[in-house]
Image: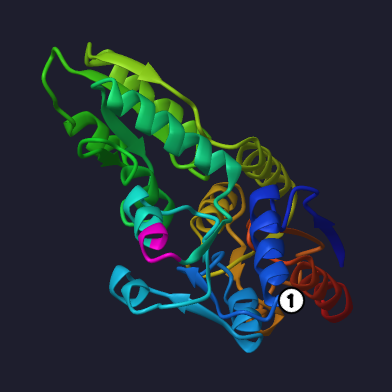
Amino acid sequence: MEVIVAEHAGFCFGVKRAVEQVYEQVAKGRPIYTYGPIIHNEEVVKDLERRGVTVIGSEEELADVTEGTVVIRSHGVPERIVALIDAKGLECVDATCPFVKRIHNIVAKESGAGKKIVVIGNAGHPEVEGIMGWAKEGAAVVESLEEARDFTCGKDEEICIVSQTTFNYNKFQDMVEIFMKKGYNVSVVNTICNATEERQTEAAQIAARVDAMIVIGGKHSSNTRKLYEICMQECANTYFIQTVDDLHLDLPKSVRLVGITAGASTPNNIIEEVQNYVRINF
C-alpha cells in the first residue's frame, strides 16, 4: 500500500504555541486552568488534565476560581472574559492564536468606528464567539450562502466583513460576492490564515489523486471537519478519524494509494501512528 501524507498536516503555528504555553505553566507547579479546551483535540486535553490542568467551561466556573493561572485558549475569548480574569486578580496567559488576535483588533477598531461587523464562520464555534465578543455593538454571523443571500441591513450602514480563520476559502469568496452584489458599503478583510488555505488546497489535491483518503482530527475540530468535506468532494472513500483506534476501514481491494491529512490540532505522533498502521496492515 502506497501512502501519501500531506506536508501541511498537524499542529499549525498557533496551536503549537498555545500547547507549549500550557506545558510551560505546568512546570511552575501552580494551579492552572484553561478557559475552554486549549485546542480541539481530546488526546492533548486529556494529557494536560493528567498533569493537573483544569478546563473551565463557563463564566460561572471562572467566577469560582480564586487563585492560580488562567490560560486563554488558542481560539480566543470575548473581551469580557479577559476583563473578568483581570478583575479577579488572576494571572492570565493569553494563548490566543496571533491570527485570531488580529481579528479581535480589527473588530474592536472597525466596530468602534461605527461599522457593523459580519463574521463569516460557524455560529457557536468558540473562535467565532470570541470574535463577536470584541465588537462594540452586536455582530452578525453568516455561515452559508443562503444566510448571505437573506442578510439585510440599513442601506446607510457600513459593514466590515471578517472570517473565522479556518473557514473554507472558496466558500468565503462566494459569500463575499453575494454581499457585494447587494450594494452595501462593504469593507472585507480576508482573515483566513495562510496555514488553513495551504492545508485545504493540499488536501484537495491529494484526495483527487488517491483511492482512499484519511482525515485525522478531533471530532469538535472545525478545521478538520472542513478538510473532511473538501476531501469528500474529491474522493468518495474519505474517512474521518480521531486516532488509530478509530481506523476500522473496509477498503476495496482496488485501493492501492491512500492519502492522509490532519487538522491543525492533531499531534504528529497520532499522524505517524496512523501512517504506520496503514502501511503495515493494508
Magenta segment boundaries in residue numbering? 85-89
* Residue 252 lies in quadrant: bottom right
The quarter of the rendered structure image containing the N terminus is: bottom right
* 18 sits left or right of 180 in the view: right
Q: State the colouring used for the structure image.
A: rainbow
Out of 209 and 23, give the one closest to the viewer: 23
Residue visible at 58% across and 57% down in the picture: 236
* Residue 46 lies in quadrant: bottom right
* 85 sits left or right of 148 in the view: right
The quarter of the rendered structure image containing the C terminus is: bottom right
* 235 sits left or right of 160 in the view: right
119 relative to 214, above or below: above
- Give the prevailing secondary structure in the magenta stretch: helix
Give the amino acid at mark 1: Ala
Secondary structure beneath dot 1 equals: loop
> Does 87 appear in magenta?
yes
Q: Residue furthest front?
A: 89
The residue at which mark 1 appears reads as 27
Residue 230 location, x and y as percent? 55, 47
Out of 38 and 253, give the one closest to the viewer: 38
Residue 250 location, x and y as percent? 66, 78
Residue visible at 68% across and 81% down in the picture: 29
Residue visible at 40% across and 21% down in the picture: 188
